[in-house]
Amino acid sequence: MSWFVSYYRTTVGKKVVMAVTGILLFLFVLGHMAGNLQIFIGKDQLNAYAAALHSQSFAPILWTVRVVMGLSLILHVVASIQLTVHSWNSRPQKYAKIRYREANIAARTMILSGPIIAFFLIYHILQLTTGNIQPSGEFALQASGAPDAYTNVVAGFKVWWVSLGYIVAVILLGFHFYHGLWSWTQTLGWDHPKWNGVRRGLATFFCVAIVIGDIAIPLAVLAGWIK
């Protein structure tokens, strides 16, 4: 681990750690969304998916994913804070006038979207994974003991302010990932004028897909399409 610690102490090392962990977190969110969209197939499908995730045979895989994602999230947050502080310290005198050229709204809101997304993640886990927070009532379980994912999702998103908070957080997540995917690929050495248009197009496509896919669920519940 000594080589990793030495490498991480450098600015480049922190940026690479942010890039790798960011891509891992992005892939997890993409897979998580794909699983959640099974709610449009029906209650039995989504609950079968939830039961499979909580089955004993899947437990080693589930906990491996949880540990990897937990470590990735911690490293991502710590590296981002350290890089931000380093950036502030390297320029204690602020610019008299700031002109943004490459930094779009996604880049300029990264420092705000990160903490908001972290708060949303904690709330989301407490509401739909552990059941500690239930603004709509009791946390429903299936006969097998696995969460009744369909009932809990529908009941939760029927509360308008829960849906609103979720939608706002997902939109911020989309901005965060958009700038992140662009920056991470640049950090990993995939920056070239020939491919920059492709990189930006792919970042736009995947982030718009995540936003639309995720907010479709609370909107469908509020509209009464999912009951």
Image (spheres, rainbow, N blue to C red):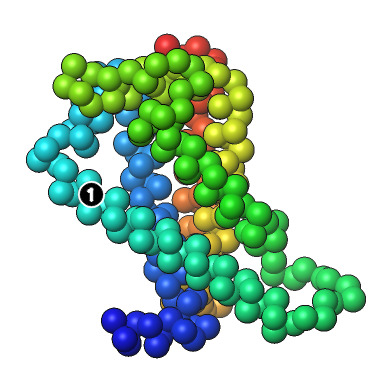
Give x and y (percent) for residue 13: 45, 81
Q: Is residue 49 left or right of residue 221?
A: left
Report the quarter where the C terminus lies. Answer: top left
Q: Up-down: is 182 above or below 172?
A: below
Q: Residue furthest front?
A: 132
| Closest to the observer, 55 or 170 | 55
Can residue 98 be seen in the rendering of this structure? yes
Corner quadrant of residue 23: bottom left
Give x and y (percent) for residue 118: 52, 49
Can residue 24 be seen in the rendering of this structure? no
| Closest to the observer, 37 or 11 | 11
For the residue marked with disc 1, what is the amino acid? Trp
Q: Is residue 78 left or right of residue 108?
A: left
Q: Is residue 77 left or right of residue 165?
A: left
Q: Disc 1 designates what residue?
A: 63
| Closest to the observer, 168 or 200 | 168
Give x and y (percent) for residue 161: 61, 25
Residue at x 40%, y 56% (from the top left corner): 25
